[in-house]
Image (spheres, rainbow, N blue to C red):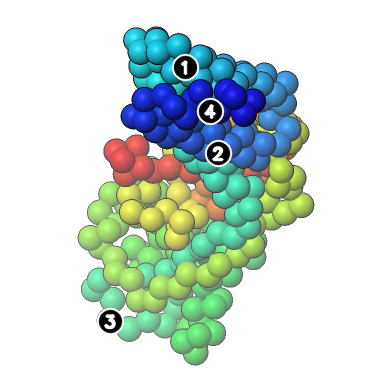
Amino acid sequence: MKRGLKRLFYQNKIKLICYIITFILLITSSILLTISLVRLNNIETFLRIIILFLVYLFMLFYIYKGYKYIVNKNKVKYIILDIVTIIISVIFLILTYYINIVYGTIGLLANRSSSYYTGYLIKLKDTEEIKKVGIISNEDDIEGYVVAKDIIKDNKLNYELVSYDDYEDIIDDLYKKALDGAFVQSSYVNYFNSNDLYPTIAQDTSIVYKKTITKKNKVVANKNSKLDKPFTILLMGVDSTLNNIETMNSFNGDTLMLITFNPQTLNATMFSIPRDLYVPIACKNGASAKINTSSVGGIECVEETIKNLIGIDIDYYAKINFKGVVD
């Protein structure tokens, strides 16, 4: 071995430096790729082993062939080998980058435990004084009831509260002047616009009070954060036009897709639910409506409605709006 190193050392110094630099690049990229693949625990284990075997087999090939070409002064073959090795090293680095992005995304998916809910107290713009206010009767409605109660408490409001089973009746009485104000969910404008009930509601009303709260998700509690077993994701395309939909959990779910993913085989099945499917809505005491309106009651209402419909447990969810599609 000493003799081989001496022979290598006495070769052209430029070739020797290129050989060392390329080898360092190759071993660095190989180690980074190895770390990234190891982090993807329980995902295609056999395939990852094969990839790592080929990576280090190529490393040994480069060490042997590079030494042989330099010592034997085979300039053309050495240059070709060096260029190929640099390209492969760059590919390793690119793979490492994208694997880390996927890993980070999965980590966010698995560890996200809270959502934001925003509720409003609104009035018609020509209303001068608020005395009687409509509020949703369902205590499980976070934006329409829980946040509304917080607004009352925080601002020490002393309104006469009138309970309603649904938002349509609240807004109907608001327009009839039977109410001076109404507690509504954050997506009330989109909801009533999309249903052609009150197309000018954005121009007709003004927000008197607004509050956002953070609530721990029931849907991600006690889930397997390693994602090493098959799981189901609810993917929603929502009609929000806000830049940040994290602050709004009430919306129309106009695209509803279930994706069941097996992390050990990388197989996925997808199932799309028509937005106008008429079903019992979980957060409306079983009253039937279009399934896209279930999301007005928040993510938990959507999940329970879908679970009751098709009997599949939903482990995680993701949502995107119009601006997300543009981006």
Q: Nearer the viewer, mark 2 or mark 1?
A: 1
Packing grade of label 3 (10 A; few <14, some 14-19, many >=20) is few
Q: Which residue is mark 3?
A: 128
Q: Nearer the viewer, residue 197 or 95?
A: 95
Residue shown at the point (42%, 83%) measured from the top left = 131
Q: Are marks 4 and 3 in contact (CB under 8 Å)?
A: no
Type of amino acid at the residue the image marks with label 2: Leu
Q: CA distance from mark 4 to mark 3?
A: 94 Å
Q: CA distance from mark 3 to mark 2?
A: 65 Å
Type of amino acid at the residue the image marks with label 4: Lys
Q: CA distance from mark 2 to mark 1?
A: 30 Å
Q: Are marks 4 and 1 in contact (CB under 8 Å)?
A: no
Q: Nearer the viewer, residue 28 or 117?
A: 28
Q: Which residue is mark 2?
A: 32
> Quick one: SS at disc 3?
loop
Type of amino acid at the residue the image marks with label 3: Glu
Q: Nearer the viewer, residue 85 or 20?
A: 20
Q: Nearer the viewer, residue 19 or 251?
A: 19
Packing grade of label 4 (10 A; few <14, some 14-19, many >=20) is few
Q: Which residue is mark 4?
A: 6
The N terminus lies in quadrant: top right
Counting from the top left corner in percent of width and height, residue 316 is at: 63, 43
> Quick one: SS at disc 4?
helix
Packing grade of label 1 (10 A; few <14, some 14-19, many >=20) is some
The mark that comes first in sequence, 2 or 4, is 4
Counting from the top left corner in percent of width and height, residue 163 is at: 56, 68
Q: CA distance from mark 3 to mark 1?
A: 93 Å
Tell me the quarter of the picture where residue 266 sits: top right
Q: Nearer the viewer, mark 4 or mark 1?
A: 4
The mark that comes first in sequence, 3 or 2, is 2
